[in-house]
Amino acid sequence: MKSFYSDAVDLAKEKLGRLVPENVCRLCGAGFDREKNAYMIEWMTKKYAVSPNSKNDYPAALEILFMHYLTSEGTKKPEGKLISYREIPGAAFYEPKFIQRAVNPIVRYFGKNPGDLIKTGEFFGGEKSAEVSGSAYSVKINLFSHLPVTYVIWAGDEEMEAAGNILFDKTAPGWLCAEDLAVAASLGAYELIGEHKKAK
C-alpha cells in the first residue's frame, strides 16, 4: 500500500514534469542540470538533486518539501517582515504539532545556552536576525533560497524558564502551506540540534 507521502510525491513530480525548468529556476532560485534532468536545490546550504522522473535518495518528508517548493510557483522574494506561525493561513490545525515538534525541541536543547543557537545557525549560513530585538537570541536561516526561517530563544533564569518561537517571512505562505512550513521548521530545528551535538 502506498503511503501518504508517496502519493503526495507522485502528484508533485507529475506537476513538476509539466513545468518549464527555466521558469521554475527563475522563480525559486534553483538550478537545473539538463544532463541529469534534475533541479539543483539548496536546503540549509546543502545541495540536492531533485528529479521529477526518478527516485530521489533522501527522506520522504524532505522530498515532499523540495517538490512543493519547486512547484509552488511563488513569485516573491523575502520582504524582511516577520510573522508568527499562527498568522499563516490554515495554521490553527497544525499549531500544536508545530510547537511540539519544532519550537519545544529548540527551547529544550538551546534554552540554557542560547548563544549556541546563533553559533550553530552560522554553520548553515545563518545570521542574527535584525528583525528580532530585545533580549532574544535569534538566528535567521534560509531553509530554501527564498524561504528564511528565524529561530528565537529567550534565555531562562532562576525565576523563569527559557522560551522560544520560530518566525517566518511574510512571504512564506506563498511557497509552502501551513503543514509543510511546520515540517520544514521542525526538520531545520533538528538539523541545528544535530550539528551542535556533532561539534561538541
Image: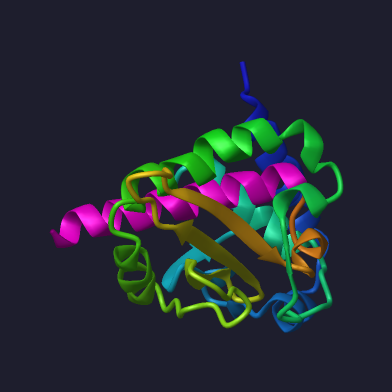
Q: Pick whichever, 74 or 189, lies toward us.
A: 189
Q: Which residues are magenta?
A: 178-200
Which residue ends up furthest to the front in the rendered image? 159
Q: Is residue 19 left or right of residue 148?
A: right
- Quick check: 195 above or below 40? above
Which residue ends up furthest to the left in the rendered image? 200
The residue positioned 25% from the left and 58% from the top of the image is: 196
Question: Which secondary structure type mostly characterizes the magenta part of the structure?
Answer: helix
The residue positioned 58% from the left and 59% from the top of the image is: 51
The residue positioned 65% from the left and 31% from the top of the image is: 96
Q: Quadrant of residue 90?
A: top right
| Residue 185 falls inside the magenta stretch | yes
Which residue ends up furthest to the top in the rendered image? 1
Q: Is residue 195 left or right of residue 48?
A: left
The image position of residue 148, as x and y in percent, is 61, 70
Quadrant (top left/top right/bottom left/bottom right) for the N terminus: top right
Q: Quadrant of residue 21?
A: bottom right
The image position of residue 133, as x and y in percent, is 57, 76
Quadrant (top left/top right/bottom left/bottom right) for the C terminus: bottom left
In this figure, which colouring scheme has been used for the structure? rainbow
